[in-house]
Image: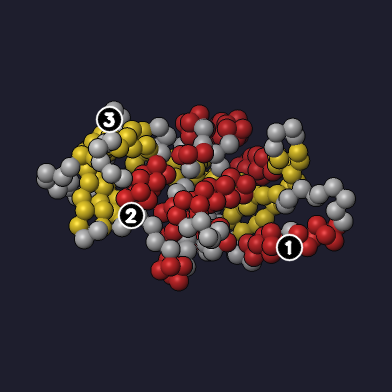
Amino acid sequence: MKINERKYLFIDGGYFRRVAKSISELYYPDIDILKIIDFHKVCYGYTKTFYYDCLPIIKKDETDEQFKIRTKKEIKFYNSLEMVPGLHVFNGMLRKNAKKNLQKGVDVKIAVDMLMHTINGNMQQASLLTGDSDFIPLLEALIQQGMYVTLLYSPKYTSKDLIYKADNKGIINSSYFFDKLNLIHRDLYKIPSVVDGGNVPKDLPIIGILKSYHGTVNDSIISGNNNVFHEDIDNIHTVYYYYHSYFNGISVRRYSFSNLNLIKLRIEEDGFEVCWDKNYSV
């Protein structure tokens, strides 16, 4: 970010919680990763951050006092967010329809706020963390107003049409959340490491084919089928594949961890699926 350039982050809290929950369930089901990340790090690099969410629905025959007690943890969480410099929380309401609970007021509030800050010239760049295709008209309107918009999203839970509308993209995955942990939790909760560059060692077995559905690697789309290579040294698995970078030509990405199944999950987080060799035990 340039000096004095105002960059705002807008977070769809319901979407953020959904992605955080899915990552927690994949790697560490006993924790809620959203509750242990450092939101100072989430807000780093932004002049202001706006977090939009909803409290649970008030149950039938539930008193205000009972509702307050039941939502005590959520309120404590939102209050802790308000203590982060530059972070502001908006709480909408949930309403029920025949199939599921829906947020009320949140999407409209995000759209109004982003357009207001754009029209008033309060920010030079806007980042929106969401995967909801309902925001497509908003992104189109912001870009028509000359705003540079970055979409932060999880490939697993995002419409392709929404991704295409943004000026820039950033993937929200386990690495994103891990980078936001404090040092104590980073020592407790490990995830596969991901490194770009280098070479694939010779004569490694091919254990599958990598296919793309939503993912990109360093803004380079994987096209066609890509062999996945495997290396096992002292019970540390390393998986390699090639991709074509717009800037660097043919490049290599490698994932390393003690658990090969978790490497597979980590690759899928980036928007890819791996068709494993049926003769190869995963």
Q: Residue, x 53% and y 60% (percent of image)?
A: 30
Q: Amino acid at mark 2?
A: Asn
Helix, strand or loop at mark 2 = loop
Residue at the disc numbered 2: 259
Q: Amino acid at mark 1?
A: Lys
Q: Is residue 105 in view from this perspective?
A: no
Helix, strand or loop at mark 1 = helix
**Residue 155 locus on image (x, y percent):** 46, 39
**Residue 188 locus on image (x, y percent):** 43, 67
Of residues 158 and 263, which is closer to you in this image?
263
Q: Residue, x 69% and y 59% (percent of image)?
A: 74
Q: Amino acid at mark 3?
A: Asn
Callout 2–callout 3 Cβ contact below 8 Å: no
Q: Residue, x 77% and y 48% (percent of image)?
A: 57
Query: Alpha-carbon distance for marks 1 and 2?
Result: 37 Å
Residue at the disc numbered 1: 72
Residue at the disc numbered 3: 225
